[in-house]
Amino acid sequence: MAKAYLVLSDGTVFEGEGFGAPVERIGELVFNTSVVGYIETLTDPSYYGQILMQTFPLVGNYGIIEEDFEGACSVRGYVVREWCDAPSNFRSQYDLDAFLKAQGVPGICGVDTRAVTQHIRDNGVMNAMICAKVPEDLAPIRAFAITDAVKSVSTGVTEVFPALGEEKYRVTLVDYGVKYNIERELQKRGCTVTVVPFDTSAEAILAGNPDGVMLSNGPGDPAENVQCVEEIRKLLGRAPLFGICLGHQLTALAAGGKTVKLKYGHRGANQPCRDLVTGHTYITSQNHGYAVVSDALPVGEVRFVNANDGTCEGVDYPGLRAFTVQFHPEACAGPMDTSFLFDRFLRMMDQDS
């Protein structure tokens, strides 16, 4: 493997070896602390515009399994300590290097990922570049910005996914960068799921007379999605509503709240969240760089908080028939700690019928 470099926008350079696609890319450098789940992570559309680094030292040991994909690969680059070129798994179809090449994504291995993680935790998320030669001018790296994130990953067409077994409910799922398992969790509970593009109007959604509306996860700065926020504002109180991740943030903005960018975000399958109503703490899967400001919500009640830093992880809107969470109940963290939230959504639709 040829020598490669991870160059940060502050001038810090980490040397390693290149694998994956032989291209150079700039992106926002973030880290994920999951021990497993790299396939789902690499195919999570919420990583749009970002160079993703795994803190777990060995990645790729069980290969690539397309059945486990959560969406289209949207990362700009991939950073690991060591990648396994001989995966051992009866389900494996090919290796990590072949996947990155097929997706046009450059990778770099042999990097001291502990040192990179510490640097980001100390200095905050910053842009970086994976390259074969250290550039003299860092201006292009510093100038990089993630734009049109939701538009770039959302579906362009309306699709219907039938309920598994008897249909009990009809749910409209607004796709801001949806992970496939959200659809599956609804389908297996008897929901026919109609997935619509991010810019679908509230009037068009309500015209379909859904039993409930689901707002998906997605990438980027939530405050940039002004039109999406306006459509959610029109939906609040009109139908039972459940938002996840970006859907959670957009709902808070629609209700008059605020969001803030975190220093280095929460990304991993081991994030503890406390339920302020029951006192229970759950292990959750998360991927977000922004958070809802808890004390800036004019309506709604904070339901979940992050046990590490106290940031908002969920909001109930009892007067608007809505609730949202920042974490991913469909992502099997715990492994099933918070999947009950889908059942709560079903009960809400039952009460509304």
Image: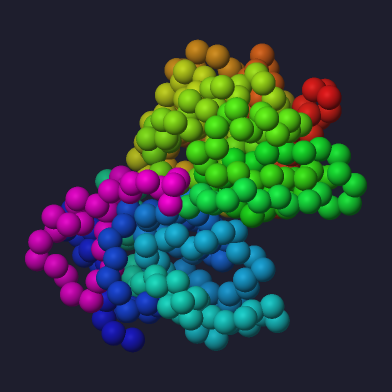
Viewer-proximal residue among 46 and 41: 46
Viewer-proximal residue among 238 and 113: 238
Name the colouring of the figure: rainbow
Q: Which residue appears at 83% of the width and 24% of the height?
A: 353
Picture coordinates of residue 203, whole percent (x, y): 60, 27
Instruction: Name the image quarter holding residue 12.
Output: bottom left
Q: Is residue 66 magenta?
A: no
Viewer-proximal residue among 336 and 205: 205
Q: Is 32 left, or right, of 351 in this rendering?
A: left
Picture coordinates of residue 49, whole percent (x, y): 37, 55
Q: Which residue appears at 78% of the width and 51% of the height?
A: 162
Number of numbered discs present?
0
Classify 125 as above or below 315. below
Residue 82 visible from this viewpoint: no
Q: Which residue appears at 49% of the width and 76% of the height?
A: 99
Direction left: furthest residue? 136
Classify 51 as above or below 83. above
Q: Is residue 148 magenta?
A: yes
Picture coordinates of residue 340, whole percent (x, y): 76, 39
Magenta range is: 124-152
